[in-house]
Amino acid sequence: MIIFLFLLTVVSECFNICLFLYLINKRVSIGHFLIILFCRIAYTKICNSLSWKFLFYFNEEIFYLLLSFFISRKPYLQSKLKIFNALLPTTLNNISFRVIIFFIFPLFGISVETIKVNYLIAVSSSFLTILLSFLLIKLFKESFGVIQKGRLAPLISKSIIIADIIMIAYTFTQQYLVYLENTTHTSTLIIRKLIVVIYLVLFFIMLIFLDRNIRATIQSQLDFQKDIQLSHLTNYNKQIENLYQSVRSFRHDYANILTTLKLGIDQNDMAIVKEVYDSVLKDSDKHLKSKTFDLTRLINIEDNTIKSLLAAKFLEAEENNIDISLDIPETIKLEGMEMVDFITVISIFLDNAMEASIQSDIPKMHIGYFNHGNKQIFIVQNSTQEEFIPISSLFERGVSSKGDHRGIGLANVRNILDNYQNISLKTESMTFAFTQELNISKKA
């Protein structure tokens, strides 16, 4: 019986750990999972053997708090979010378990006292608890996935703090009442039932409020991105119209030129031919080689959002007298990275490149976007005023090559890229040139 109960405990803890990892979108190897499981069981045994029994009633919450801070070591992940990740599964389990044993089982004639002595019912309630908690987390999984990225809007950040306070208050109150009942032998069942009802309502209000705030923030970000895309597309379309008018005018002028040349050739009048060449044809290649015609290479980009952004930045660079070139040799469509994140990253790269090149003696920029084997590579290169820029600390918040307290952009880049295991960034500075090379491995 002891071995059987131990195995049930191990299986139950396995499900609890899986629930926690599912919430934080974390995949671990079997070896690491077994280490976590061993630590969980060992920690429970240690707490149970301590003379201060009060600690045992909070051993699950304390363990997952420690695990959350250890396993989520990304620098941008705030403490309030780590607390949220630790307490949400344990609080869900706690509330779900008490709803089952206080309100559902009694409907079938199963009392709390029966559960304490009937191992089969106790085990059933434990697994029902985990299943119910999993379904609730799955219901709000999209919203939870957003906050795991760590880029929290002010309203969401406040909502998480409120959620943390509610969960801490519930856990402490409920477990303290259990501790009192076991040490003083005074029944606190009615109070605990009342607390479960109150906090069940508060908990669902909290989850719905948090979910709505996250969805509203996402929608706001999407609307903002759409506005930017529309603005860029408008500029891009205007430029295409200008190119069309330019080509049309160029063709019309050349028709007149050819007519004049034909007249000179028919009359065998080389003076006319020479005059046409010297006045028009001699410099016509400059028109065809205009950087504006590089925009036609954007046709190889299938994503309109990226196409419009690059067109807008290209035109902005030209307005600032930057010698800019584009290299998009073949048809390409973004893979392996979310569009919003990709646009944010390359916008920061392009803005920084433009600002740095303007300050250089000979402003130059080069943009490349192409496939290379199983990777997509996006390159931004710009001229710099300095021969060499130290890059070791450029991605720290507040550190920038452009001056003090102006490095938030690149810090955000690092925060975004930390969410992608399939993306690497190569940064180089040499001989008055600064290069950012983003390598995106295509997901299978």
Image (cartoon, rainbow, N blue to C red):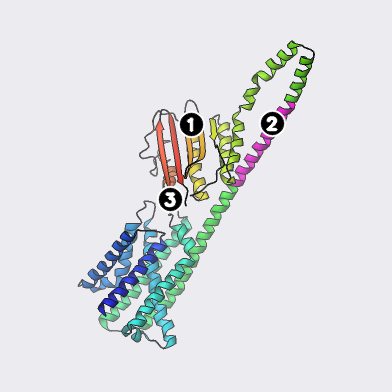
Q: Secondary structure at mark 1?
A: helix
Residue located at (59% from left, 50% from top): 226
Residue 193 in magenta stretch: no
The three-letter amino acid code for the residue at tag 3 is Tyr
How far apart marks 3 and 1 lie (CA) works out to 29 Å
- Mark 3 / mark 2, whichever is N-terminal: 2
Q: Position of residue 29 (x, y in %)?
A: 34, 58
The three-letter amino acid code for the residue at tag 1 is Ser
Q: Which residue is mark 1?
A: 357
The dominant secondary structure in magenta is helix
Image quadrant of residue 122?
bottom left
- Furthest residue toward bottom: 109
Q: Which residues are magenta?
A: 229-253
Report the side of 226 relative to 180 (left or right).
right
Residue located at (76% from left, 15% from top): 265
Q: Position of residue 391 (x, y in %)?
A: 38, 37
How far apart marks 2 and 1 lie (CA) works out to 30 Å
- Any part of residue 188 in sight: no
Q: Which residue is mark 3?
A: 420
Instruction: Name above or below for residue 223 compared with residue 190.
Output: above
Residue 247 numbered mark, or none: 2
- Mark 3 / mark 1, whichever is N-terminal: 1
Image quadrant of residue 40?
bottom left
